[in-house]
Image (tube, rainbow, N blue to C red):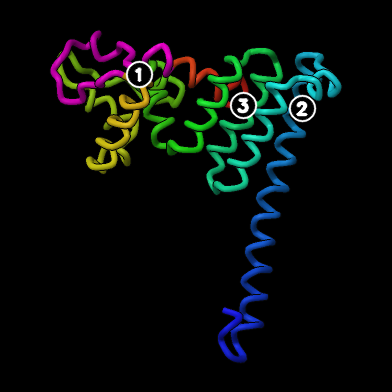
């Protein structure tokens, strides 16, 4: 833009200022979130700032989560990152290697992936937590449950297929069998893998789940 005569210079300054302001605003909000989690760890778990400052897993998590938070506009992702920080600081982490992998998953996957995984882990609880009545189905496919729980995602079949395929590829969920006919009790069974359940636990906490 600086090469455009007359307009270039001033315009580039405006664009740089706007982008700088937007990113600084996003980073400032994330800093407030981190401080909030540190305060929560102290108030709820009695963990001091000094203890956190000497916790390498926590410091690594803060550094990685900050990088991700700075590059996403998703408030849901920032909530997952904040919950992960709380869990690591509270000693409910998963080890350094898994921690790095699971934070990378937060960066790479979308909120639709996370929501679908929560549904697959425990369909009855997912609907109950959201005040959605369980469908009166004696026999049918899980697609009927997904349609009731996540109608927007269900309506976008290409996106739904991508999301379910990705969750399987990451080893977080089994094939949900959206069109496979099963009993009503079979529909209630979880399709999340142990890894998928551990991942969801890692990125959620009691005030944000």
Q: Residues within 10 Å of mark 3 (few under 14, many from 20)?
A: many
Check residue 69 in the rendering and tell me which mark sits there, or answer none: none
Judged from the image, the secondary structure of the residue bearing numbered disc 2 is helix
Identify which residue, 58 or 24, lies in the foreground. 58
Location of residue 195 (image quadrant): top left
Q: Distance between the residues labelled 2 and 1?
A: 32 Å
Check residue 83 in the rendering and tell me which mark sits there, or answer none: 3
In the rendered view, does 150 fall on the left or right side of 144? Answer: right
According to the picture, the residue beneath numbered tag 1 turns out to be: 123
Residue 73 inside the magenta-drawn segment: no
Tell which circle, 2 or 3, labels the residue nearer the N-terminal end: 2
Q: Distance between the residues labelled 1 and 3?
A: 22 Å
Residue range of the region highlighted in magenta in the rendering: 174-196
Location of residue 197 in the rendering, given as x and y in whole percent from the top left corner: 44, 15
Identify which residue, 40 or 20, lies in the foreground. 20
According to the picture, the residue beneath numbered tag 2 turns out to be: 38
Figure check: 12 above or below 195: below
């Amino acid at each position: 833009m600086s090469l455009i005569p007359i307009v270039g210079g001033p315009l580039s300054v405006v664009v740089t200022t706007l982008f700088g302001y937007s990113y600084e605003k996003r980073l400032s909000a994330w800093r407030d979130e981190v401080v909030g989690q540190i305060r929560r760890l102290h108030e709820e778990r009695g963990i001091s700032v000094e203890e956190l400052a000497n916790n390498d897993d926590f410091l690594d998590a803060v550094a990685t989560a900050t990088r991700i938070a700075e590059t996403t506009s998703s408030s849901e992702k920032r909530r997952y990152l904040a919950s992960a920080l709380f869990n690591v600081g509270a000693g409910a982490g998963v080890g350094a290697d898994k921690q790095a992998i699971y934070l990378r998953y937060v960066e790479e996957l979308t909120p639709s992936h996370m929501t679908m995984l929560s549904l697959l882990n425990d369909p009855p609880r997912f609907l109950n937590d959201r005040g959605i009545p369980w469908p009166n189905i004696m026999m049918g496919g899980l697609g009927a449950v997904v349609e009731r729980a996540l109608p927007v995602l269900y309506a976008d079949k290409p996106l739904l297929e991508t999301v379910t395929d990705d969750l399987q590829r990451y080893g977080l969920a089994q094939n949900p069998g959206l069109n496979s006919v099963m009993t009503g009790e079979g529909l209630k069974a979880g399709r999340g893998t142990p890894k998928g359940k551990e991942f969801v636990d890692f990125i959620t906490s009691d005030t944000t789940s």
